[in-house]
Image (tube, rainbow, N blue to C red):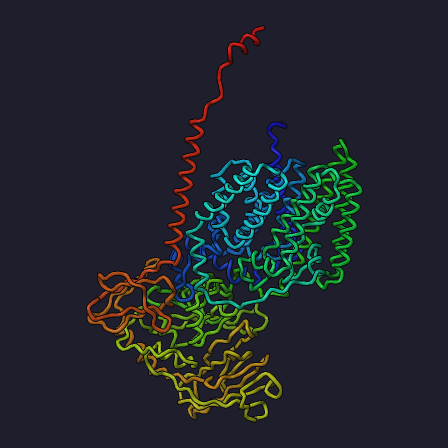
Amino acid sequence: MKALFRPRQAAALLAAAVTVTAFCAGDVLARSYPFGPRTRSVNDLGNQYVPFHAHLWDLLHGKGHGGLLVNWQSGYGASFLPDLGTYLGSPYALLVALFPRDEIDLAVYAVTLLKTASAAAAMAWLLLTLRPGRWWAAGLLGAAYALCGWSTADASYNPMWLDGLIALPLLCLVGEWALTGRRRLTGVLLVALAWTANFYTAYMATLGAALVLLLRLLLARPPRRQALATAGRAVLTTALGIGLAAPLVTVVYFGTKHAYPGRVRQFAPVPTEDVAARLLPATYGFGSPALYVGITALLLALALPFHRAVPVPVRAGWTALALAVALSLQWGPTHLLWHAFATPQGSSYRQAFVLCGLLVVAAWHAVAYGLPDRRALGAATALLVLVVAVASRSTLVRAYTWPVLLLALAGAVGGLVLLGRAGHRTRLAGLAVVLLLGAQVGETAATSAVATRLRLGHLDDYEPWGERQRTQAAAIAGADDWPRYRTDPGREQTVGNDPLLVGGEGAQYYSSLTSDVLSRTLTALGDGWTSRGRNVQSLDNAVTDVVFSVGARVHSPPDPHQKYLSPYPAPVTVTHRDVPPLVTVRAEPDRTPFGPSPYRNQELLLGSRVYTVPRVTVHDDGGRALPSRRVGTGNALARPTITARCPAGTQVHLWAPHFSGTARLAGAGQSARFRFEFPRNRAAMEPLGTAPASGEVRIELRPDRPGRIPSGAVGCLDTDRLAGAAARLKATGATEVTVSGATVRAELPAGSKGIAVVAAPRIAGWRCATGDGPERPADAFHGLIAVPLDGTATSLTCTFHPPGLRLGTTVGAASLLTLVLLTAVTAVRRRRAPAPPTTTSPRERVTTAS
């Protein structure tokens, strides 16, 4: 039986089991999905990760529009491979295909849980590889790493980051193999897997693993030649692994180069008391480093410097490395190094999981050499008391932190002391282990529950898939006729990526890789956005619907889950519009650059004048004119108004990108919602109703924060002129359009001259050809794809080539060839090496016989 028992496998299984138990227990305590009524879809989890996994489900089941290269559902046509590499590169993502489509939230939860358990197992395996020891202790510490504060507070709703949590111990194992000169092929494949799954956190994990390998070399003190050989093997393994991942990594890199720039932030370190607070259980703070690893692991890490059974170089080395990385979190230059020289727009401590891993490894060395004695435990407890004293000044420490801390400390100290006294008494040792495991599960579940509850108060949150999404999806499915026309899921969005979640093809798109040309083009047309321009929204506008061939538009009531809206009972409806095809012809294109007015910009794209843009006057609630047109302050706070004159019967639109509140056309029914918050949100243009017969337009405003109304805020749309312009574009446009993956083909009327315009953003990578001509980079017409026509061609083909894919494929092929050659050479050398003797010598035979 003992021969069948393998400590590393047992430790990995224990770590995974403890992780799953504590993770789920935390959600039970928080009454969070799927164990309670509270949603866990906060911020990017609801806006990005769940919708992207839903789109992956569609692609895996052959139901998505587009393929791996182009996502035709979002942003009127977006490059998908960078998003795949950023959000869906992990092999765990494929597991969503095993779940029903309407259980996509549960699928993402299961993937998150499995990733966290895998990180625990990988760390437990690493610990026993670094040094033999108690397998259950390795399992306990593996779970402590996987359920660290960074994991439960930050990565649990950013599941792509969890791939970095798995990558750190795996890359440290690769370093161990480099030390012994073994498993080059496996090491290369693990590096490639880590960088493919999520290159961002893999980069941080690679830096952390490099520091661990450097320390291991310093402690081992091999001859210089052997040390250089080890470093060379590690560098070669890492380079080949990253090279194999290059087809995806380079595409993501170039995708970021063409993405809309986010806000540039300057790093500011948090106070020391906040750093100390995040070492403790049941604390939470969005912008501080989540360094919690459990009181047991923290006590052991603090005891390491005083543990006399551990060699001095080992004590000093791991303690110094942990301290150095801790200090690097708070220093600007090293902060930039950890984050690939770009300060994140969200949390500034995304590398905190590396320090958590180092604390766990330090704790392992404190227990692997034998349990710390009373002196070491006493010193560690004194240091912990000092940490608690510093942390007590932080606002991140709340009332419920103290009972959780005291119970965890009692369990940790009691378990360690009991274990030290157990000796060979199995029952006493078993009781100590149960006490340690119970303390770990309890405090981690409480910490996770606190983070889950407090996130709901700090971040935006969204309902999981339910009746609203089912109704929207059914309405879209009934109206969709892609690629004859687009079906937009509607202005009344549920999450930031509605088209991926409920279907259709719209402007709405939220990604870290939202293209610059898409965001700027839609902004010029009057669209709104959040996340500082990277989350563009649907634009409920008849002109842009004609331009982008939106033939069906879904209208839903406001999402009642969003508390800032006033829900009203209304059915989900679909409006249809006769629109031109996806490819139109402009005989005399107007290339006048976009200006400040979105109404005039829309007309430039349409090719016809359809708006009247009157002069507006803004009045305060007393009827006095406001020359500054500023509202939301002073007398203008209560109910300011906008007056203008529009031709009778025209459709009145309000463009107020810097206004937050509601606007209502006097005499009309429902108010339109505008949401502006500098620099995060920009409000979209909204239709308000029909101008009365008198032409006197009065718009009532109810601001909820200070804002400003622009001079050209009101646009009066002549629907008859728009119908005529749409008819002309349809008559001269493509007679047939087909879309297959990343290729658009169109049949054009004979003699077409000027330019053909494809109703999709001209993102980098589009190449087009007319007739049998060669492919050339597509031109641009006010941000859309354009192709010159000379009257001879009757067909058009445009194909998307993701920037960086050719370079990445070349690098990947070179890396693969190098790996194959190195593997072959190694195999030949082993075959040619002299085999050990298989027969005994005569002298040995004589000795044996005697």
Q: Quadrant of the C terminus?
A: top right
Does 55 sit above or below residue 643?
Answer: above
Quadrant hosting residue 817: top left
User: Foreground residue, 796 or 595?
Assistant: 595
User: Foreground residue, 305 or 278?
Assistant: 305
Does 155 sit above or below residue 633?
Answer: above
Name the residue rendered at 73%, 60% in the picture. 397
The reply, left or right, for residue 813 in relation to residue 756 is: right
Name the residue rendered at 53%, 40% in the picture. 230
User: Foreground residue, 587 or 546?
Assistant: 587
| Position in image of residue 824 (x %, y %) | 41, 35
Does 200 sit above or below residue 670?
Answer: above
| Position in image of residue 561 (x %, y %) | 57, 67
Instruction: Confirm whether residue 462 shows in the render.
Output: no
The reply, left or right, for residue 489 in relation to residue 639 is: left
Q: Which residue lies most toward the front here?
A: 224
User: Foreground residue, 459 or 104?
Assistant: 459
